[in-house]
Image (cartoon, rainbow, N blue to C red):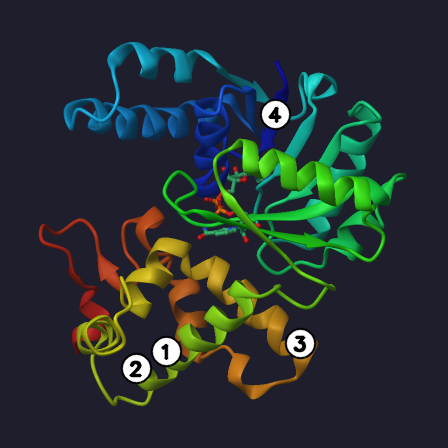
């Protein structure tokens, strides 16, 4: 039985842990405090409970999945892992610190993957002694539902690491796209960042409301979800960090973050995870946050 160690138990980490446990891996799910992991495991459990109610999974299967996930603090037991997947905040300095420590603890044949959306894998890998085993492994939100995992090698990632990462992702029942060379935010996140940013500019210019823009993109472009519902799901902070990075690295005005995003960050309107973003999730049905209704 192979072992997966997921660092960071938030939106993405808890989903990746569930996907791996469903694929019968032994999983360690870690965070800076055990309480945080517990809170996130409650969310995983509630999601699985809903699947039981819909008749999609049995109680016994859920018990097995949950039984394969162990909650740990920091990097406890990381030396047992074959695959280490980091999913902490989008902060390259933090990621470099974590990779440095993980590289020291992990067994030599383990691969070290980052779920980063926009940090450079080469920059993260340069913090470790064995950069050839580092790779970008970008799951999509929510990991349990989304089929694609984008693999993004850095310039020092070895062919073996890329192949091992591909085999691993396929064993999870997912599909991969592998970038040919490193570019800021890979394929999907870069294209999406431009589109989402344009929606915020259209809103800031007062051209249409949050709801109207979302409806337009769903009905007119056949998108499954409008740009604001999607930013709320991704996290306003994550989108903000991504556009800042893309703007800095490309100098292209299409990624320039709106002032509105800065205001939302300051006000704690981070999207679904904080209860309010472009929409207010405390209301049933969900409505645009009062600020945007003015
Ligand atoms: N949210 C998305 O839609 C999405 C999609 C794809 C990729 N990503 C990427 O995944 C990563 C995580 O994003 P998220 O949305 O899950 O963030 P999140 O804020 O929901 O979770 C981050 C978690 O990391 C934990 N953490 C912080 N410092 C830590 C440390 N030193 N050790 C262990 N845990 C630590 C936090 O306590 C938190 O639980 C980011 O790099 C992001 O860019 C996010």
Characterize the local packing of mark 3: few (<14), some (14-19) or many (20 or more) Cα atoms within 10 angstroms: few
Q: Earlier in the sequence, mark 1 or mark 3?
A: 1
The image shows residue 199, relative to residue 236, as above or below, that is below
Q: Which of pointers 4 and 2 lies earlier in the amino acid sequence?
A: 4
Q: Quadrant of the C terminus?
A: bottom left
Sequence-wise, which precedes: disc 4 or disc 3? 4
Q: Residue at x 44, y 28 (%)?
A: 18
Q: Which residue is mark 1?
A: 200
Disc 3 on helix, strand or loop? Answer: helix
Query: What residue is disc 3 on?
Result: 248
Secondary structure beneath label 2: helix
The number of numbered badges drawn on the structure is 4
State the SS at label 4: strand
Q: Nearer the viewer, mark 4 or mark 2?
A: 4
Tell which of 290 and 216 is nearer to you: 216
Q: Which one is in front, 182 or 73?
A: 182
Please give the residue where the numbered disc 4 appears in the rendered image.
4
Q: Residues within 10 Å of mark 1 (few under 14, many from 20)?
A: many
CB contact under 8 Å: marks 2 and 1: yes
């Amino acid at each position: 039985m192979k072992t997966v160690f997921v660092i960071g138990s938030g939106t993405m980490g808890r989903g990746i842990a569930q996907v791996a446990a469903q694929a019968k891996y032994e999983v360690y799910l870690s965070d800076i405090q055990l309480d945080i992991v517990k809170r996130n495991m409650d969310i995983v459990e509630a999601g699985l409970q809903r699947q039981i109610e819909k008749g999609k999974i049995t109680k016994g299967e859920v018990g097995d999945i949950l039984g394969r996930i162990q909650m740990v603090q920091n990097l406890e037991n990381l030396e047992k892992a074959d695959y280490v997947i980091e999913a902490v905040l989008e902060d390259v300095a933090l990621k470099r610190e974590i990779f440095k420590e993980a590289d020291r603890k992990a067994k030599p044949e383990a691969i070290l993957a980052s779920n980063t959306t926009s940090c450079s894998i080469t920059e993260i890998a340069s913090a470790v002694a064995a950069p050839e085993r580092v790779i970008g492994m970008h799951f999509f939100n929510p990991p349990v539902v989304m089929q694609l995992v984008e693999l993004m090698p850095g310039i020092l990632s070895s062919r073996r690491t890329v192949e091992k990462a591909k085999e691993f992702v396929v064993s999870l029942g997912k599909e991969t796209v592998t970038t040919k060379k490193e570019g800021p935010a890979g394929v999907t996140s870069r294209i999406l960042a431009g589109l989402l940013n344009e929606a915020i500019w259209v809103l800031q210019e007062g051209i249409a409301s949050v709801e109207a823009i979302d409806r337009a993109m769903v009905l007119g472009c056949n998108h499954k979800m409008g740009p604001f519902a999607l930013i709320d799901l991704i996290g306003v902070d994550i989108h903000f960090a991504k556009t800042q990075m893309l703007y800095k690295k490309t100098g292209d005005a299409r990624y320039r973050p709106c002032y509105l995003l800065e205001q939302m960050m300051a006000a704690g309107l981070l999207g679904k995870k904080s209860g309010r973003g472009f929409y207010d999730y405390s209301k049933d049905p969900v409505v645009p946050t009062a600020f945007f209704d003015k």
